[in-house]
Amino acid sequence: MKTSTKAVSLLLSGLLVLSCFGCGAKESPTPSPEASPVQNAGLSYMAGTYEGKAAGRNGDITVSVTVSDSAIESIEITDHMETEGICATPFAQIPEAIIENQSLAIDSVSGATLSSEGLLTAVEQALTAAGADIAALKAKVVSSAGPGEAMDLTADVIVIGGGGAGISAAISAAEEGASVILLEKGEFLGGNTLLSGGQVNAADPELQGKIETAPGQLETLKGFLEEEDESTYGDFAPALTALKQEITEYLAGDTTYMFDSVELHIIQCYQGGSRQDLDGKWYRGDYDLIRTLCENSLDTIRWTAGWGIEWKDELATVYGGLWKRGHQNTGSKGSAFFTCGQPYAESLGVEIMLATAGKSLIVENGAVVGVNAEKNDGTPVTLHAEKGVIVATGGYGGSVELVKEYNNFWPELPDDLTTDCAATITGDGIFMCRDIGANLVGMEFVQLMALSHPVHLDSTGLQSAPENTLYVNPEGVRFVNEYAARDVIAAAAWAQTDGIFYGIDDINSAAVRYTQEQLDGWVERGDVWRADTLEELATQIGMDGAVLADTVATYNSYVDAGVDPDFRKDVMALKIETGPFYATPHKPNVHHTMGGVQIDTEARVIDTDGNVIPGLFAAGEVTGGIHAGNRLGGNAVADALTFGRIAGLNVLK
């Protein structure tokens, strides 16, 4: 058995419990030994309380089910690791439906399929222990009202998609006094933004002026001054010229604290996204779109404070972000944009229609004037837009089949490729726009999240900032620059045994982002390994202890020197030197798609002839051209919120 396979086989599902309802795990009572099955109208149970457990999206879902001799009385979710925001709807609706109908023939909640199926399976397990006839419970038909009467609605603005871009667009338009209807095909808002870490990149000299400069950062800045042929930067050449002047002035003064600027963000977006496809064709980000993003992202952050979102007075390096400019809210990562954004939008009069999918755009005289939609029960909905339609349905990363169909960047994608994208992100808006002549750009490029968990579909476990951690392969050897772009790390990971690698941390690097309670929880569930020495840690995961110890010692020497001769990592903040030590397994999966609908800086959709399609706007992951062949970490939510806001303003012009 290979080392990495052995290690993964030992994993137990789990994260620190994220309870949507604040309920903790508790021991379920044992049924009375005198209890016996009693037949009553086809239902038969041994009265008592039973526990059931099954895998959800991120880990096990544990339930406590109480039955009488003839009925299911109560269902309580006692422990789970599902994403806050995603779990709330199925955890509220499914137990209620089971009890109301006394049936297990309950549909999954749209957008939360894995959480729904895990909950249903856990309940089934508990009822099996109670002596239930599971086949009969699954066969009991739950009545459905079926399609309702066709709906016909009108508003100034129709927004399709309720993720970060959609909620931003709706709020932006509503703040200007527009009437807005927002459609979301899932049964809750969020999309990929809900699943994200919630970080937003923005050059912020005020906060960055409090962060000490790393030696490697100075070398990186000096490297820009060595770029002699600016013409190779094309449209980005003026930004490079301006950046060189900024860097020259910075290096001539006090360099104690970190440098950043809009120009540096622009050039790093350009460098991070410039990629060739498998046919040798180069893709580079659209200069005007990138400048619009980088110039407006900080103001976007400040704007969202009006939703009720609070932002930390500090910055972080987002994995694959290349620079320390990631802003983080004080809430629960990506969910904060909806726990704050949804009530704020509704206070502005935004009508939110959940479980309603856009199907096609209505075009009259060459302009988009509405949307044909359908509710999950089949009810047809026609929506008329007085001002325009904003498409914010996300990319196509929720469908591995589509990813493989469009991929022309990764030489080979494995048969068991998984995705951590929302299940609702299946390219709907891209294809709706394409069907009326919109131009699509960059559909070849798919981003893989190398730090995903090899067991869980979601990114879980200990993920230290790239300047504080070390990546090693199953043989204990360092193989990549931890501060590199995401596609670089993912490509390097695929070349390792089984595509698996490990993040190595000590107690100091782990404590930067995580509490001891979180660390203990991951270790207890088997998601993360912990040991007092590196040799013991290596033994736990089937690795050569001497090799790992030598790798760490070499890396620590680079941290001391501030120079990494092996992989040119330019920011190394902490050494891996103080026990206990931690190892977290990682394996790439689908995380983001860079291609989509072409837009201009006003978020207007462009057709295949290069003309604006009147009445049609788009924002967020549904669009292409901004991130070119690779998105920088921390730019996705910045993109969604910034261009969502721009779309909401411009649709009213």
Image (cartoon, helix red, strand yellow):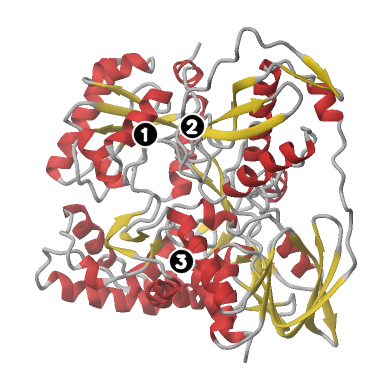
- Amino acid carrying label 2: it is Ala
Counting from the top left corner in percent of width and height, residue 86 is at: 58, 48
Counting from the top left corner in percent of width and height, residue 152 is at: 84, 76
Counting from the top left corner in percent of width and height, residue 133 is at: 80, 19
Which residue is under mark 1? 479
Residue at left offset 63%, top offset 86%: 178
Q: Quadrant of residue 16?
A: top left
Q: Residues within 10 Å of mark 2 (few under 14, many from 20)?
A: few
Q: Residues within 10 Å of mark 1 (few under 14, many from 20)?
A: some
Q: Is residue 414 visible?
A: no
Hey, which residue is sitting farthest top in the picture? Answer: 33
Q: Nearer the observer, disc 2 or disc 3?
A: 3
For residue 163, above or below residue 195 = below
* 2 or 3: tag closer to the N-terminus: 2
Q: Nearer the observer, disc 3 or disc 1?
A: 3
The Cα atoms of the two marked residues, 2 and 3, are separated by: 31 Å
Residue at left offset 83%, top offset 55%: 377
Task: Report helix, strand or loop for mark 2.
Answer: loop
Residue at left offset 51%, top offset 48%: 84
Q: In the drawing, what numbered circle is on residue 334?
A: none
Q: Is residue 270 left or right of residue 476?
A: right
Which residue is under mark 2? 495
Hey, which residue is sitting farthest bottom in the picture? Answer: 653
Task: Report helix, strand or loop for mark 3.
Answer: helix
Q: In the drawing, what numbered circle is on residue 638?
A: 3
Pick the front one: 223 or 330: 330
Counting from the top left corner in percent of width and height, residue 115 is at: 62, 39
Disc 1 + disc 2, Cβ < 8 Å: yes
